[in-house]
Image (cartoon, rainbow, N blue to C red):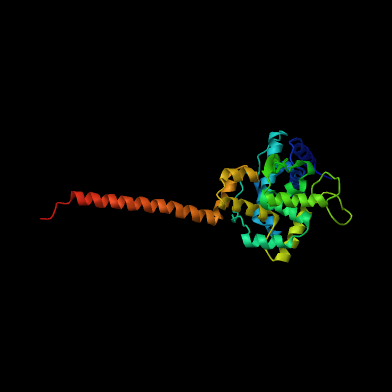
Amino acid sequence: MEPIELLWYRRALKRKNYSAHTVKSYVSILDHFIRWLTVPVAEVSRKEIGLYVDHLLRKRRTPKTITCHLQTIRLFFDYLINEEGRSMVNPVTRISLRLPKPLPRHLKDDQVTRLLALITDMRDRAMFMLMLRCGLRVQEVADLTVDVVDYGRRQIFVSSGKGAKDRVVYMSEDARSVLSAYLAKRSSKTKGLFLVQKGPMRGNPISVRGIQKRIEYYARESKLNVSCHRLRHTMATQLLNADADLATIQDLLGHGQITTTQRYCRVANLKVQRDYYKAMDVVLQRTQTQEEDDDEGENMDSPELS
C-alpha cells in the first residue's frame, strides 16, 4: 500500500500540472526511498540521507542517478514542510556529489549521411529527421499529433514540452518532405502522429521506449554511437557552426537557461575556429598599424644625420 505522504504528494504534483512522466519518476524514487527507511518519514535526518546514499552506492548507482534521488527527496520534504505544515527540518540541505560534466556529443556530417542511408522506413526516417532538423526531444516526438503540423508554414507546435512549456519549431525542406511521405502511407485516423506498425499494439501511438529501440537498432546497424538525444545535439551544433545566434538555438531547443545552450559552444569547433581567425586577423591588423605608426613617430623625432 502506498504511504499516505506519497499519496498526498502525487496529488499535489498532478494539481500543479506536472507531466505524467515526471510524476511517475518522482513517485518511483520516493517509494523506493520510503520502503528502504527504518524510521517514519517525519523522523528522517541527515544521518538517514547519508546511509541512503551509501545504499545507492552499494547498488552501483551512478552519481547522476544518486543526485536525481536526492533532488527528488529534497523537493518532497519541501512539500511536507511548506504545504503540509510538518514541523521538521529538510534533511537534504545540500547535494555534495561531484558530477562529471561531459560535453554534448554530436554526429559529424559524414556520420549523419551514413545513418540516414540506412533508415529506409518512412516512419522511422520522419521521427529521426524531426530530432535532427527540428531539435525535438524523444518525448516530444512521441507526443506529437497530426494536427500540430503546419505544412504551409513548415512549422510544428510543440505542446507542453519539458517544463510544461509550449514552443514552435520549424521544419527544413527535407524534414517536411519525409514527413509528408510518411503521412501519405499512413492510413490510420488515429490522432497520434507516429504509430506502432506491427504486433498487438499496431495503430497505437509509439512510445518513447519504442522510438529508442528503433534508434538502438540503427546504431547497431551503422556501428555509430548514436541516440535520440545525440541527434538533437547534432542539430544544435550544426546551427551554431552555421553562425545561428545562440538565443535562437535556445528558443528552438526549448532550453530554459542560456547556460544550457552555451554548452554547445564548447563542441562547435568550426565556429570557434572561424571566430578565432576572424578576430585574430583584426588583432594582427591593429598591431601592424600600431607598429607602423610607432615607426613613423620615431623617424620624425630622430635628428637628421649630417
Q: Is residue 74 visible?
A: no
Say if residue 212 shows up in the picture.
Answer: yes
- 260 w.r.t. 110: above or below: above
Considering every residue shown, the one lying at the far right of the view is 200
Q: Residue at x 69, y 45 (%)?
A: 72
Position of the N terminus, as image quadrant, is: top right
> In this rendering, would 198 be left or right of 265?
right
Camera-side residue of 53 and 257: 257
Residue 209 falls left or right of residue 69: right
The C terminus - image quarter: bottom left
Q: Position of residue 37 (x, y in %)?
A: 74, 49
163 or 271, nearer to the observer: 271
Above or below 146: residue 228: below
Query: 184 or 69: nearer the eye?
Result: 184
Where does the image place residue 67, in percent across and percent down from the top left? 65, 50
Q: Quadrant of residue 112?
A: bottom right
Total label count?
A: 0
The image position of residue 143, as x and y in percent, is: 77, 46
Q: Position of residue 118 (x, y in %)?
A: 73, 63
Residue placed furthest toward the left: 306
